[in-house]
Image (cartoon, rainbow, N blue to C red):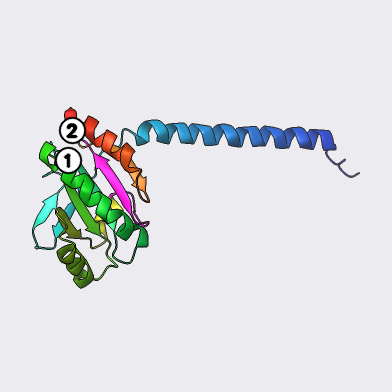
Amino acid sequence: MSASPTPPKARSGALRTIGAMVVVAALAIAGYFAFFGSQQRVPDATFTLLSGQKVSTADLKGKVYLVNFWATSCATCMQEMPQMIQTYNRFKGEGLEFVAVAMNYDAPMYVANYAQTRQLPFKVAMDDGSAARQFGNVQLTPTTFVIDRNGKILKRYVGEPTFAELDALLQKALAT
């Protein structure tokens, strides 16, 4: 005696139920990251500046700051850098700090040359790969984190930020 095949209607209902469960799970995961992702704290990380000086996220506690992962080989990074400079210059008087972290695959002499010829007005660091890992395994550049005075990550931008939105976020964070 052979088992009778599952009727098409029953199969269709089971697939719909599984589909609904997948959608519910996806929404639950998205909700978790939307809520808890906005509550994320900055990791303990140390940046080695081009000068050899070390700056850690602990050193920056109490300040509003940006951490921007970039590379000289990244076209989008090069495109956004003049606006990043303008953003920093606009808010540095209110206490904004900025650490531009060159990715570990970027040649140090290219980074140093770029920082010098463009007169980057903020801290420039070379990553050995550890900072990118500590910030959630950053692999795409540019990736920029906005961090408030309490060490809370307010926003993570992957790609070029919307600068009007970034300005508004910084104004609010610096006002508190």
Tell me if residue 115 comes above or below residue 92 in the rendering.
below
Quick one: which residue is furthest to the top in this view? Answer: 176
Q: Quadrant of residue 104?
A: bottom left
Measured Cα–Cα span from mark 2 to mark 1: 9 Å
Front: mark 2 or 1:
1
Extent of the magenta region? 135-150
| Kind of residue indicated by mark 1 | Phe
Crowdedness near tag 2: few (<14), some (14–19) or many (≥20) residues, C-alpha within 10 Å: some
The residue identified by callout 1 is 91
Q: Position of residue 151 (x, y in %)?
A: 20, 37
The C terminus lies in quadrant? top left
Question: Going from the N terminus, do you reach mark 2 or mark 1 first?
Answer: 1
Residue at 85% across, 41% down: 5
Looking at the picture, tell me which residue is in the foreground, 57 or 75. 75
Residues 38 and 4: in front is: 38
Q: Position of residue 114 (x, y in %)?
A: 21, 66
Kindly state the secondary structure of the residue where label 1 is placed. Answer: helix
Q: Do callouts 2 and 1 mark residues in contact (Cβ within 8 Å)? A: yes
Residue named by callout 2? 174
Q: Which is the main secondary structure of the residues drawn in magenta?
A: loop
